[in-house]
Image (cartoon, rainbow, N blue to C red):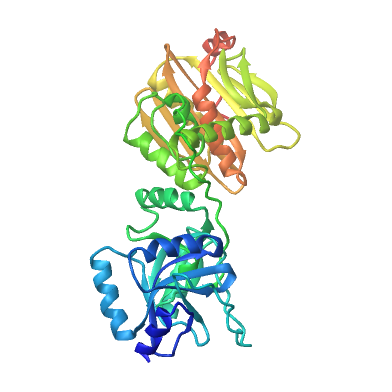
Amino acid sequence: MRRLAFLVMAAGLPVAAWAQDAVIRIEAKRDTEAAEAASRWAGQFDDVVTFPLPRGWTAIAIGPLSSEEAGKRIGALKEARQIPMDSFVTVPEEGVVLTPVGDAAPVALAPEPAAAQPDLPAPGSYLRLQSVEARADADAALSQWRKTFPEAGLAELPNGWFGVVLGPVDRAAADAWLKVFKDGGVMPKDAFVSDAAELGSVIEPGKAPDLPAPPAAAAEMPPLDQVQRALRWAGVYDGEIDGKTGPRTRDAIQAEILASRLSTDPGTAMRELIARRDAWRSEVGLTMLDDQATGLSVMAPMDRLAFDRTERALSIYGPRDGSGAALILFSQPGGQQELLDLSGLVTALGWVPQPTRTIKPGHVLLEGANEAHIGRAEGWVQGGRAEGFVLIWPAADAQGQARIAAEMSDSFARKGPAANDRATSEAALPME
């Protein structure tokens, strides 16, 4: 039978694959690209054949061969790096026609059996996250991977194993994001990219992830102080705003790229992040507040605040239209002790519930929350004064609170003299 098969091929005619015949699958292309690729492989090997795959794909293979011959030959070819490392041995289904690459014209496919065909992955490239042999292990792996990539799916591979995959995406995007995910420790080092035709059938469908292709050219990185502020707004950076590159800034840029997946290019990703921050600031109504009583200036959500009153060293803004927000600015002459006294007042009045305190020379930070609100008080000793702010925000909007607090901390400054200094010098601060 082997001799007969080769005689038929030598005659330039298509042959039907016998049950014991195997082939070495080396590539799969869309029908429009298959002829060129097959011709290229035929320049290396004399026994290149093609056969149809579902959904308009064409397999390019070496064969037909006995299973024993195929096993020996694929090992030698891979060792010599003459074929792709993801090539594999397969036995075409009964009735599939192998067409030798040469002068023979393609022939019509044999009628497909009446049995339902398995679902196949949509065309495109896929990130191969993990491969396991047992179905139960595959289901467990998919469940775990979906915590990081909710779009992941499960495929039954041609070799009988199961693969957790992410796709389809453009090939350039798949290659670029694979590197980013590996560098960020999100994907294992042995993860790789496969074409749809190499995945077998779909077991658990996934969804195409939103992974943009890399830009044609890298974008210039914005000024680093702007980048650091935007990264702090995004919640991935808690270092100094110093405009200097360093491990914390680099790690935060990587963390933001992994979290938002806006671009694999750092410059492009940071420009997108800064634009998102600017749009958010407009959306929440952040404007510059110049408070005459304390002489302080700060970026604040004034569409949710209404001036209430001043009390010596304090300037108090209550909620507007039931927003649940409040802001207290404080300023008085003094140093570290006066700053600690003010932080004690904040705690006594319950503005920051059950606070966690971070106390350093010249700086105090109190953070706490209950079921109703989140409180944050931050103060500094600067210019011979103890001053700062308290932000009270609804507990249901923790992300908004963190972002607004970061904006206030960044923008906090002295605008002019404090009108309440005289009142503060005449009497102590009220403790109730």
Horizontal side, residue 254 vs residue 120: left or right = left
The quarter of the picture where the C terminus appears is: top right
Determine whether 336 is above or below 371 in the image.
above
Along the viewing direction, whichever of 269 and 364 lies nearer the viewer = 269
Residue at image position (39%, 66%) is 130
Determine whether 376 is above or below 158 in the image.
above
Q: Quadrant of residue 66?
A: bottom left
Along the viewing direction, whichever of 367 and 211 lies nearer the viewer = 211
Determine whether 123 is above or below 177 in the image.
below
| Residue 156 image position (x, y, % from top left) | 47, 76
Horizontal side, residue 395 vs residue 87: left or right = right
Along the viewing direction, whichever of 304 and 161 lies nearer the viewer = 161
Residue at image position (61%, 16%) is 291
Tag count in the figure?
0
Residue at image position (37%, 83%) is 6
Horizontal side, residue 53 vs residue 192: left or right = right
Asked whether residue 160 appears in the rendered view, the answer is no
Asked whether residue 168 appears in the rendered view, the answer is yes
Residue at image position (40%, 51%) is 181
The quarter of the picture where the N terminus appears is: bottom left
| Residue 102 image position (x, y, % from top left) | 44, 70
Determine whether 166 is above or below 282 in the image.
below
